Amino acid sequence: MTAEDELESTAQRYLSACLQLNRPPNMCAVFGGSPEAVTAAHNCTMKVGVVGGEWGVRGGIRWRQGQR
């Protein structure tokens, strides 16, 4: 998967990667460092590993402290 694939959203990129790996999303993991990455993976039923920063939990989703 590359930027040339021209997928519109982070979630589309994650789901495309699952298809290429021939794995369902709930059997894949995303390691992300932004609220957008965490939210997209969570919405795709993927496991999420948060990388870097100070994070908190709001509404069951991990967010960087001070961001909304």
Image (tube, rainbow, N blue to C red):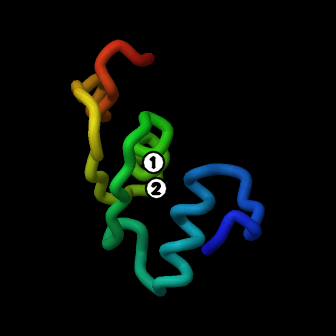
10 Å crowding of disc 2: few (<14), some (14-19), many (20+): some
Q: Nearer the viewer, residue 23 or 51?
A: 51
Q: Nearer the viewer, residue 53 or 1?
A: 53
**Which residue occupies 29% across, 19% down?**
65
The quadrant of the image that shows the C terminus is top left
| Numbered badge on residue 44 | 2
Residue 35 screen position, x and y as percent: 43, 34
Mark 2: which secondary structure?
Answer: loop
Residue 6 found in image quarter: bottom right
Q: Nearer the viewer, residue 21 or 65?
A: 65
Residue 34 screen position, x and y as percent: 43, 38
**Which residue occupies 29% across, 58% down?**
47
Please name the residue that numbered disc 1 is placed on.
43
Amino acid type indicated by mark 2:
Cys
Mark 1: which secondary structure?
Answer: helix
Amino acid type indicated by mark 1:
Asn
Are dots 1 and 2 in contact, CB under 8 Å? yes
